[in-house]
């Protein structure tokens, strides 16, 4: 379990809402960006479908979009249309024998799949 003190906040630069990555997630983003030939640049987006409404996808480089967060030399870009759904996510990286993956830390107001990378925001309609 991730302790609150182990999380670093990456501020969403649009609308002032928070996107949180654990220290291990930041280290892995840095590593992947350097190996991918784009040090300091990472792209995050949400793919519709899968086990829940959205699945996160992180890739090295600035593929397109707006800068949404900066921390420890990494700038994270995302499609402007997805900023609202990214705001408030807590993302961790867990390394295991299968290679490791980025996973969403579930919190109140959301539902996460057991896979760890898919989620839905619970909305009061």
Image (cartoon, rainbow, N blue to C red):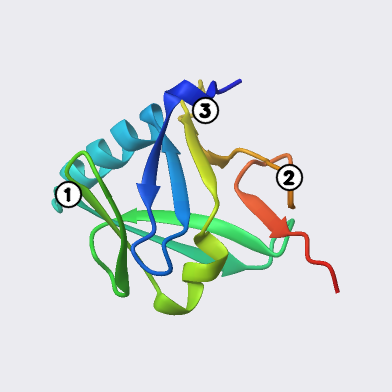
Q: Which residue bears the numbered disc 2?
A: 108
Disc 1 or 3, which lies upstream in sequence? 1
How crowded pointer 2 is (Cα within 10 Å; few <14, some 14-19, many 20+) is rated as few
How crowded pointer 3 is (Cα within 10 Å; few <14, some 14-19, many 20+) is rated as few
Q: Which residue bears the numbered disc 3?
A: 98
Disc 2 or 3, which lies upstream in sequence? 3
On the image, the x and y values in percent for residue 89 come to 54, 50
Q: Which residue bears the numbered disc 1?
A: 40
Residue drawn at point x = 86 percent, y = 74 percent: 125
How crowded pointer 1 is (Cα within 10 Å; few <14, some 14-19, many 20+) is rated as many
Disc 2 or 1, which lies upstream in sequence? 1
Circles 2, 3 touching at the beta carbon (< 8 Å): no
- Badge 2 element: loop
On the image, the x and y values in percent for residue 22 come to 43, 32
Q: How many marks?
A: 3
On the image, the x and y values in percent for residue 53 come to 71, 65
How far, Cα to Cα, is label 1 from label 3? 26 Å
Image vertical order of residue 49 relative to residue 90, above or below: below
């Amino acid at each position: 379990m991730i302790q609150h003190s182990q999380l670093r906040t990456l501020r969403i630069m649009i609308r002032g809402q928070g996107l949180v990555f654990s220290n291990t997630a930041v280290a892995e983003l840095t590593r992947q960006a350097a190996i991918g030939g784009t040090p300091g640049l990472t792209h995050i987006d949400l793919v519709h479908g899968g086990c829940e409404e959205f699945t996160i996808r992180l890739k090295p480089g600035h593929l397109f979009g707006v800068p949404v967060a900066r921390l420890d030399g990494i700038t994270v870009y995302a499609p402007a249309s997805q900023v609202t759904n990214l705001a408030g996510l807590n993302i961790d990286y867990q390394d295991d024998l299968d290679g490791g993956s980025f996973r969403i830390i579930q919190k109140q107001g959301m539902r996460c799949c057991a896979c760890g990378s898919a989620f839905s925001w619970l909305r009061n309609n």
